[in-house]
Image (cartoon, rainbow, N blue to C red):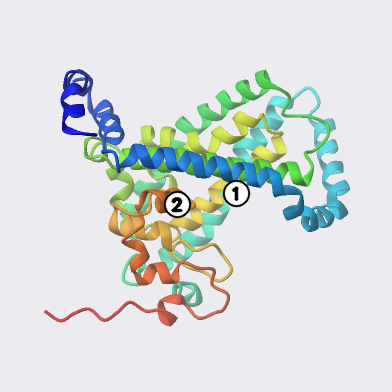
Amino acid sequence: MTVDDKTNHNGKDLWVLQHGAVSDAVIFALQEGSGGLWDSVKKAAFVIGSSLLLLAAFGNSLTWHLQKFWGASGDFWQNQWTHLLVTFEGHETALFYLGTMLAPMVTFWSSNALLLLVDTTGKPGFITRYRIQTDKNNPVDPVKLRHAIKAVFFNQIFVSGPMVVGVYYFMTWRGNPFASELPTFHQGLMELAFAAIVEEIMFYYSHRLFHHPALYKHFHKQHHEWTAPIGVVSIYAHPLEHFLSNMAPALMGPMLLGSHLATTSLWYCLALLSTTISHSGYHLPLLPSPEFHDYHHLKFNQNFGVLGVLDRLHGTDSKFRTTKAYERHTLLLNLTPLNQSIPEPPKKVQ
């Protein structure tokens, strides 16, 4: 945007900026300049759109072998689903909430119970040796932890709960999430991929927006109290942020597609497992690397997304890619902690 362009927009900008912090943040994001965010959004839309077309075009060949494996157990899962439909006949609403509320809650708290045991006791040692920030949370501050858990319960009950109720009414209005036939393996995989892309787009931009100074101090600062995160603080956030940046991106994919309850439930559970691992603070063997988001908590202004695609397009991972943490951002395939095989360089003596 040229100087003349900015001058021509002054009247409109002043009018918008008078409408509070949220409007201020949106205007800031949309007017970073010709080489800034808006141009990157257009580039991201082109790249992601092209990716979706390629995914659709080559989906059959990419999943052929997995489809054969799924076929061997497909009848088993179809029989289980048929049994559930018969059991809950006339009570499909309860079945929906079991799949979209209870199953994700059990997934979240069972995985975090194991992590909390390590976080609060510092044992067993063969787990703590994989801690990313070795000098933090050893063990975790119990007062700080109790405060976080209370906020997590509040968000789950008073924010996530009503949102899932809204999803139920939308999904049943849009179609039939209780179809007697389960989705094929190929269809389910494609829907999960689509949901992941939608989450990446919505989370990246909402998350980056919450880092604008006008919003950060009022909303997102709460989440960043944990510069060395642990699993349970993945949904420790201001309720507004939890609504817009945590829940909405995860819910939107299945809503857009009108997904089957089985796919929706699986996606919710996977999304919660993913964010738990990203915040866990431990880079464990055979699990996805949490280095990317752990670095975001450490440095604040890098790595805003989930998959890292939009961070690469926008250049918001440029500093991260120069660090040892980036070298460690890989799947660990042996038992040697990466902070030992790829250690930080010695600190310079003042």
| Residue 116 visible in image | yes
Q: Nearer the viewer, residue 318 or 188?
A: 318
Q: CA distance from mark 2 to mark 1?
A: 15 Å
* Mark 2 touches mark 1? (CB < 8 Å): no
Q: Amino acid at mark 1?
A: Leu
User: Foreground: 61 or 111?
Assistant: 61
Residue position marked by numbered label 2 in the rendering: 232
Q: Earlier in the sequence, mark 2 or mark 1?
A: 2
Label 2 SS: helix
The secondary element bearing badge 1 is classed as helix
- Vertical placement of 8 versus 113: above or below? above
Which quadrant, please, contains the N terminus? top left
Give the residue drawn at x 54%, y 47%.
Answer: 272
Provide residue 103's location: percent of width, then percent of height.
63, 43
Rendered position, 134 above or below 270? below
Q: Is residue 231 left or right of residue 331?
A: left
Total label count?
2
The percent position of residue 52, horizontal first and vertical second, equals: 60, 42
Left or right of 223 on screen, residue 280: right
Residue 244, how many percent across, how many down? 42, 33
Residue type, mark 2 in image? Val
Q: Nearer the observer, disc 2 or disc 1?
A: 1
Q: Residues within 10 Å of mark 2 (few under 14, many from 20)?
A: many
Classify residue 262 by image quadrant. top right
Q: Is residue 268 visible?
A: no
Q: Residue at x 83, y 31 (%)?
A: 180
Question: Is 178 on the left or on the right of 323, as rendered?
Answer: right
Quarter of the image with the C terminus in it: bottom left
In the displayed structure, 252 sits above or below 8; it is below
Furthest-left residue in this view: 350
Along the line of sight, which residue is nearer the eye, 106 or 41? Answer: 41
* Disc 1: which residue: 270
